[in-house]
Amino acid sequence: MFKKMFICLGMLAAFTLFFASCDKKKEEWKGKERTLSIIKPDAVSANHIGEIISRFESEGLRIAALKMVKLDEKGASDFYAVHKGKPFFADLVTFMSSGPVVAIVLEGDNAVLLNREIMGATDPSKATKGTIRSDFAKSISQNAVHGSDSKENAEIEIPFFFTEKEQQSRF
Ligand code: ATP
Ligand code: MG
């Protein structure tokens, strides 16, 4: 009888400790900087999704939300609207709507800048060795990943892909 009670109390204590440590972890990540990453159609079709995501995680960023989507031309054009009128705009829209992409909300300290560092320069021939674009991008127009370039733009780009509820999926 006492033995059974002792086991039950032990299990209760273990569950309490487990849930308390989960809550503490959640609190640690609340309010961390967020950025939007997109794994572009070239990297998706070349089967590099896993390798790219593992770079984010190994550099200390956390996946807060993630989905695979296929943009249509209007979606791609709206997302990159800031580049409308530039000579590469039409090709960019065609490329970004040519196949599925993986949209990811990354979070962590200095997430915007850290993600840009992990990505490397826009032109892969100028990207630092070991960056995603240096290792996986084919050209300046098919360059494996997108990353928000400021906190302000991240706040605009994240809701482009994720509802409020989806943005909170890890909490
Ligand atoms: P992204 O916004 O996709 O993260 P980025 O911020 O490094 O890229 P931007 O200047 O915002 O670079 O350009 C958006 C995208 O347009 C680039 O990723 C690239 O695919 C394309 N692009 C930019 N400049 C050129 C160019 N000179 N020739 C062809 N494509 C270009
Ligand atoms: Mg950009």
Image (cartoon, grey):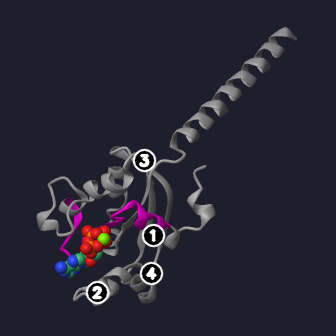
Residue picked out by circle 3: 108
Hey, which residue is sitting farthest front in the picture?
152
In the rendered structure, find residue 71 and report the number of the disc placed on it: 4
Specify the quadrant that holds the N terminus: top right
Query: Mark 1 or mark 3: which comes first in sequence?
Result: 3
Q: Nearer the viewer, mark 3 or mark 4?
A: 3
Task: Please provide percent x and percent y for residue 27.
Answer: 57, 39
Residue pictured at 41% horizontal, 79% vertical: 79
Query: Mark 3 or mark 4: which comes first in sequence?
Result: 4
Where on the picture, by quarter, is residue 3? top right
In the rendered structure, find residue 157 and report the number of the disc placed on it: 1
* Apparent side of residue 20 relative to residue 123 in the rendered image (left or right): right
Discs 1, 2 touching: Cβ within 8 Å? no
* Apparent side of residue 103 relative to residue 116 in the rendered image (left or right): right
Magenta segment boundaries in residue numbering: 135-158
Q: Nearer the viewer, residue 86 or 133?
A: 86
In the rendered structure, find residue 58 and report the number of the disc placed on it: none
